Image (cartoon, grey):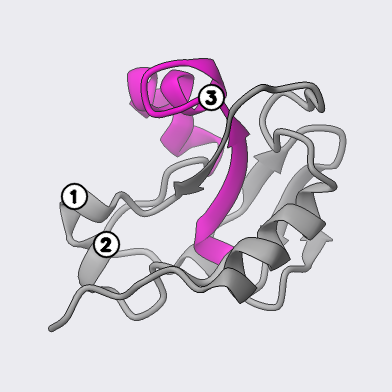
Amino acid sequence: MVKQKMSEEAVSLVKNRAGWACEHCGTQSSLRWSIHHRKPRGMGGSKDLLANKAANLLLLCGSGTDGCHGWVESNRTKSYEVGLLVHTWEISSEVPVQIFGFGLCMLDNEGGKQPC
């Protein structure tokens, strides 16, 4: 299977859903933003056709080594518990995630979120 590329549409959906605020800590003043894959790409997620859909993506401050994105990568057990990470056998749109200022919710591939 070929690695899927993240579309500008998916990025736009995620940024709009987040209101340009980190979906983990709520900051709106980050100097650096990143799109985080809830299902890690290095663990088979890159071959998943849903890997680059909005339900699998979060807007986080920092990179994979700093900010909230770095926190997720360094605190994997807790990140799985709150849905910031999704196991390879799970479907991201079916796994609740804790979003700052919103609470536990389900994300969809159209850029929406619904409370649980």
Height in image: 64 above or below 80?
Answer: above
Name the residue: 79% across, 43% down.
Answer: 20
Amino acid residing under circle 1: Gly
Q: Position of residue 62 (x, y in %)?
A: 53, 24
Residue of label 2: 45
Q: Quadrant of residue 73?
A: top left
Cα–Cα gap, marks 2 and 3:
21 Å
Q: Is residue 32 above or below residue 80?
A: above
Q: Earlier in the sequence, mark 2 or mark 3?
A: 2
- Quadrant location of the N terminus in the rendered image: bottom left
Instruction: Return the mark for residue 42.
Output: 1
**Does 59 appear above or below 30?**
below
- Say whether residue 97 is magenta: no
Q: Residues within 10 Å of mark 1 (few under 14, many from 20)?
A: few
**SS type, badge 1:** helix
Q: Helix, strand, or loop for circle 2?
A: helix
Q: Which residue is mark 3?
A: 62
Q: Residue at x 45, y 16 (%)?
A: 66
Of labels 2 and 3, the one closer to you: 3
Distance of mark 2 from mark 1, alpha carbons? 6 Å
Mark 2 in CB contact with mark 1 (< 8 angstroms): yes
- Asked if residue 116 can be seen in this view, the reply is no
Residue range corresponding to the magenta coloring: 55-83
Residue under the point 81% across and 63% down: 114
For the point 16% across and 81% down, the residue is: 2
How far across and how far down the image is residue 108, in percent? 66, 72
